[in-house]
Amino acid sequence: MDLPLQQQEEEGAVRLGMGAYSGPVRPVGDGGAAGETMLLWALGQPAAQRHNAFVRHAAHSLTLDACGRRLSLLQSPSSMATPGVTGAVVWDSAVVLAKFLEHAVDSARLTLRGARALELGAGCGLAGCVAALLGAHVLLTDLPDRLKLLRKNVELNVGDDARGSARVAQLVWGGEPDLLNPPLDYVLGSDVIYSEEAVDDLLLTLNHLSAPHTTIILAAELRNDAVLECFLEAAMADFQVGCIEQQQWHPDFRSTRVALFILLKKPPPLASQPDALL
């Protein structure tokens, strides 16, 4: 049974606010990466919930009501046959992240209007498009061969009447990006924690894009506990990490197969001061 929020706060299980998000966040740290991974699998039982609860990978488009309009995201199911290509369809984690952003803005726990944001591994671009409709100026990024579909979805869903704006650019993780003149206000990502081999490049890119004021929000599909543990362990060296519990998500878009993390870059350590002269 979940503890009441006030009791959780008193016992240190959650804290109010992390970065630009003012809602409850459960810090990840006391139990380490292994403890957090065990908690998500033991309590959430991700394998017990239906896979792809909010999406249909066989369909050529996905429709979703968000921000007072009906979004239509084109998909390319045939591209899924190509090894390594996963961004041609929308995943549950993208839906969870997009609807969380909308719900957090509507609940006054997050402000996106006028913010500078970047979506990593945008795929079909759902989360980035929603962030733009909520007022952010978003750069949606992915590998070069994924940009055609991404541009089409941005053109279809983010018009001149949007509160914010959206544009598309390629970004290969691990380099030194000079996009939107980082650091940014927000970095968003869904299903970007997918292999141990990609963790170092992902974290290198997150470091390049962020400063201590940058709020990073990542929605992770819970497929492989070893991959998630690897990511969390590496991330905690440079970032404060928190988990946003499902009670804070959009009430109609919750899944134990998805975890929602918020990251803040740790400030650099203070340089040691020489002993004062006596």
Image (cartoon, rainbow, N blue to C red):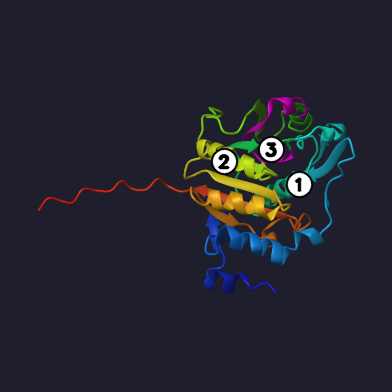
Foreground: 188 or 251? 188
- Give the residue type that dot 3 points to: Gly
| Contact between labelled residues 2 and 1, with CB atoms less than 8 Å apart | no
What span is in magenta? 126-149
Q: Give the residue pinned by disc 3.
A: 128
Q: Quadrant of the N terminus?
A: bottom right
Q: Give the residue pinned by disc 2.
A: 200
Foreground: 75 or 133? 75
Q: Looking at the image, is mark 1 or mark 2 nearer the viewer?
A: 2
| Contact between labelled residues 1 and 3, with CB atoms less than 8 Å apart | no
Quadrant of residue 172 within the rendered picture: top right
Foreground: 222 or 256? 222
Q: Is residue 33 above or below residue 196?
A: below
Please give the name of the residue rendered at 53% of the width and 36% of the height, measured from the top-left corner: 209
- Give the residue type that dot 2 points to: Asp
Q: Residues within 10 Å of mark 1 (few under 14, many from 20)?
A: many
Please give the name of the residue rendered at 75% of the width and 55% of the height, measured from the top-left corner: 257
How far separated are the C-alphas under marks 3 and 1?
A: 11 Å
Q: Residue 150 in the image: state x and y as whole percent.
A: 74, 30
Please give the name of the residue rendered at 63% of the width and 73% of the height, measured from the top-left corner: 4
Mark sitting earlier along the chain (2/3): 3
What secondary structure is marked by label 1? Answer: helix
- Give the residue type that dot 1 points to: Val
Quadrant of residue 112 within the rendered picture: top right
For the question of whether residue 109 can be seen, the reply is no
Mark sitting earlier along the chain (1/2): 1
Q: Give the residue pinned by disc 1.
A: 95
Q: Residue furthest right?
A: 59
- Indicate whether residue 256 is drawn in magenta: no
